[in-house]
Image: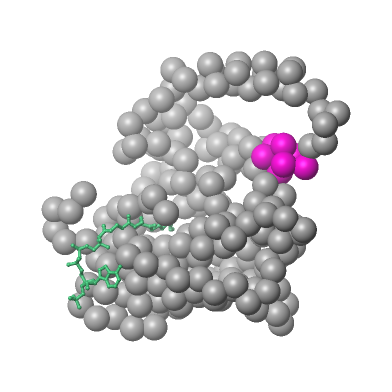
């Protein structure tokens, strides 16, 4: 839960400019984060026969290639590609929005193998990570600078890995700077998890 909402709504940002800053093509960045998700899923599923020494050497080379391109937060692309289904980030389970308004969001969620806890169930910490992401879309649609004050999650059934799930979030109540929201994750008719959250709009001048 580390993102701070920015004042400018996503539509006003120039994704081309963001990518230019990062020295990447618009489509190239999409392909890169997609490839990274695939890679992380395969790291998670790899057995002991994997050629880890060679892979580690390759990974170190990739790190060395990216190191000179480090920029400050305001110029980063990761998580800032609002034109892409996953915002161009791999930190959260995949959320592909179908609908985002100022009062609700709905879409498809998918937990890749990377998010496995055990026995086919998603890691318990990954579920609120998804909820925070989805709720964040609603809050951002309101054009607010806000942060999560709490996010309570109830686990009703296991959250399966590798399936398209449905996630819904809505604003229940607004009181001054406080936004009370709820969210639900389901697998068909089965509810996997529910969440209640409070987002607090930041005071002027808050970092
Ligand atoms: C497209 C989407 C992409 C983005 C998706 C990612 C979204 C990620 C969003 C996040 O995860 S943000 C990062 C995680 N959250 C934080 O780091 C927040 C850390 N905490 C804070 O910064 C402050 O505590 C906070 C801004 C939440 C509140 O501080 P303030 O000084 O602005 O408010 P204040 O403490 O005066 O409280 C304001 C009201 O909220 C209430 N409140 C604050 N924290 C509360 C709490 N934890 N529980 C219950 N009530 C709470 C408080 O009682 C009060 O109620 P009243 O107005 O009725 O008096």
- State the image quarter where residue 93 is shown: bottom right
Q: Image check: 98 left or right of 142?
A: right
Query: Would you place residue 108 above or below residue 7 in this image?
Result: below
- Horizontally, residue 121 falls left or right of residue 99, namely right
- Give the residues in magenta: 39-45
Q: Quadrant of residue 189?
A: bottom right
How many labels sit on residues?
0
Residue at x 39%, y 30% (from the top left corner): 21
- Residue name at image x 29 percent, y 80 percent: 174
Q: Residue 84 placed where, x, y %?
A: 54, 51
**Can I make out residue 135 in this image?**
yes
- Image x and y of residue 166, in percent: 64, 71
Front residue of 109/80: it is 109
Q: Nearer the viewer, residue 207 or 159?
A: 159
Image height of 58 relative to 191, above or below:
above
| Quarter of the figure that contains the N terminus | bottom left
Q: Is residue 159 magenta?
A: no
Seen in the image, is 118 located left or right of residue 174?
right
| Residue that protrudes farthest toward the right in the picture | 49
Q: Residue at x 39, y 55 (%)?
A: 11
Secondary structure mostly taken by the magenta-highlighted segment of the chain: helix
Quadrant hosting ligand 1: bottom left
């Amino acid at each position: 839960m580390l993102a701070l909402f920015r004042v400018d709504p996503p539509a006003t940002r120039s994704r081309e400019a963001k990518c230019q800053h990062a020295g990447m093509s618009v489509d190239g960045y999409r392909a890169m984060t997609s490839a990274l998700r695939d890679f992380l899923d395969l790291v998670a599923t790899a057995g002991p026969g994997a050629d880890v020494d060679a892979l580690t050497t390759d990974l170190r080379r990739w790190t060395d290639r990216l190191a000179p391109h480090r920029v400050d937060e305001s110029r980063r692309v990761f998580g800032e590609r609002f034109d892409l289904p996953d915002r161009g980030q791999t930190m959260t389970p995949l959320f592909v929005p179908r609908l985002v308004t100022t009062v609700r969001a709905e879409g498809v969620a998918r937990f890749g193998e990377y998010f496995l806890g055990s026995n086919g169930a998603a890691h318990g910490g990954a579920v609120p990570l998804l909820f925070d992401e989805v709720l964040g879309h609603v809050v951002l649609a309101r054009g607010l600078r806000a942060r999560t004050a709490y996010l309570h999650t109830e686990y009703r059934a296991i959250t399966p890995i590798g399936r398209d799930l449905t996630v819904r979030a809505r604003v229940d109540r607004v009181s001054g700077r406080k936004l009370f929201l709820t969210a639900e994750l389901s697998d068909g008719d089965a509810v996997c998890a529910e969440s209640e959250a409070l987002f607090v709009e930041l005071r002027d001048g808050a970092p």
